[in-house]
Image (cartoon, rainbow, N blue to C red):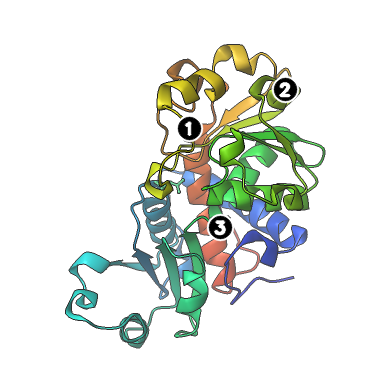
Amino acid sequence: MSIAGKDIFDVDLLTPEEIKQIFEMAKEFKEVLKRPIKKVPALRGKTVCTLFFEPSTRTRMSFEVAAKRLNADVVNFSASTSSLKKGESFKDTVKTLDAMGVDLYVIRHSEPGSPMMLKRYTDAVVINAGDGIRAHPTQAILDGYTMWERFGTLKGLNVTIVGDILHSRVARSNAKLLKMMGANVTFCGPKTMIPLGAENYGVRISHDVRKAVKDADVVMGLRMQLERQSGGFFSSLDEYNEFYGITPEIMRFASIGAIFMHPGPINRGVEVITEVADSKISQVEDQVTNGVAVRMAILYLTLGGENYDNT
Ligand code: CP
């Protein structure tokens, strides 16, 4: 089993065994991140290029840190200061970067399918860092890893995802990965924010947050994606918070030992209140730490690594 040379457009292009292989490798790399010198020469001589056409803090920085921890060279492409502004096409831009010896691209774009479009112009590995509302595979893998690390398995885990599911690539990729790994998933939000055909993901759907959270092992909050909304999905952020905001009272419906997760960025007082976001049950910062280890594993494995000698 090897994912060498494989593009990561979404999680359903990976098998459960390959996802488990990424988890195991991330566990190894997490140990590296705890050392005084958090660096290994696993990708020395490789070049990673990040292409972010949408804002990002976690994903872009996390890929950059992950690549640098593996000793790869990293170049960050900025659309606003590039020759795209002088009319150069996307194809010619990619051909130019390819000619500089890029081995792997990490792309985020508002257009669903943009990673596949990039792949038409390059033989380098392409990793999707979020394409519109379609997919965010590395977020789902790091979320799955965080649950696996905490509970030892995803099989039989009850995971409730609450919020703006309609506009969420995180919810879509998470539902696919979690179902593939044997978890039970519930989508919860106002009717206007659950996509048509959501049942096709094999998830339970609920509009009542108390019922949705009952017996959950994991409650995942999602941000209102206002930048993707044209309005009319809910009356006000305050009203949304009143009905769907995650509070300590809502978390009491969950299982004993349940955790709160959120991919970030968080809008406090909207989808979650500070008392939960900053509580001991919150995994938000662990998710970020795990994101670096998981992305190290993804970069390493897709660029041809197999069993890394971590000694
Ligand atoms: N979770 C996530 O994708 O965050 P960023 O938008 O900051 O990358």
- For residue 15, side relative to residue 194 (left or right): right
Instruction: Tell me the amino acid under the disc marked 3.
Output: Ala
Instruction: Tell me the amino acid under the disc marked 2.
Output: Lys
Q: Image height check: is 53 above or below 104?
A: above
Q: Position of residue 85 (x, y in %)?
A: 19, 74
User: Residue at coordinates 41% horizontally, 38% vertically from top-left?
Assistant: 265
The total number of labels drawn is: 3
Tell me if the residue at label 1 has its CB under 8 Å from ligand 1.
Answer: no
Q: Report helix, strand or loop for mark 3.
A: loop
Instruction: Tell me the amino acid under the disc marked 1.
Output: Phe
- Distance from Cα at disc 1 to Cα at disc 2: 20 Å
| Label located before the other in sequence (1 or 3) | 3
| Label located before the other in sequence (2 or 3) | 3
Asked if residue 279 can be seen in this view, the reply is no
Q: Position of residue 115 (x, y in %)?
A: 49, 71
Q: Image height check: is 251 above or below 236?
A: above
Q: Image height check: is 71 above or below 193?
A: below
- Which label sits on residue 211? 2
Q: Position of residue 240 (x, y in %)?
A: 49, 25
User: Residue at coordinates 62% horizontally, 26% vertically from top-left?
Assistant: 259
- The nearer-to-camera label among 1 and 3 is 1
Residue where numbered disc 3 is placed: 135
User: Residue at coordinates 62% horizontally, 53% vertically from top-left?
Assistant: 173
Where residue 218 sits, quadrant-wise, is: top right
- For residue 139, side relative to residue 111 (left or right): right
Q: Label 2 near label 1: C-beta < 8 Å?
A: no
Where residue 162 sits, quadrant-wise, is: top right
Q: In the rendered image, which quarter contains the N terminus?
A: bottom right
Q: Residues within 10 Å of mark 1 (few under 14, many from 20)?
A: few
Residue where numbered disc 1 is placed: 234
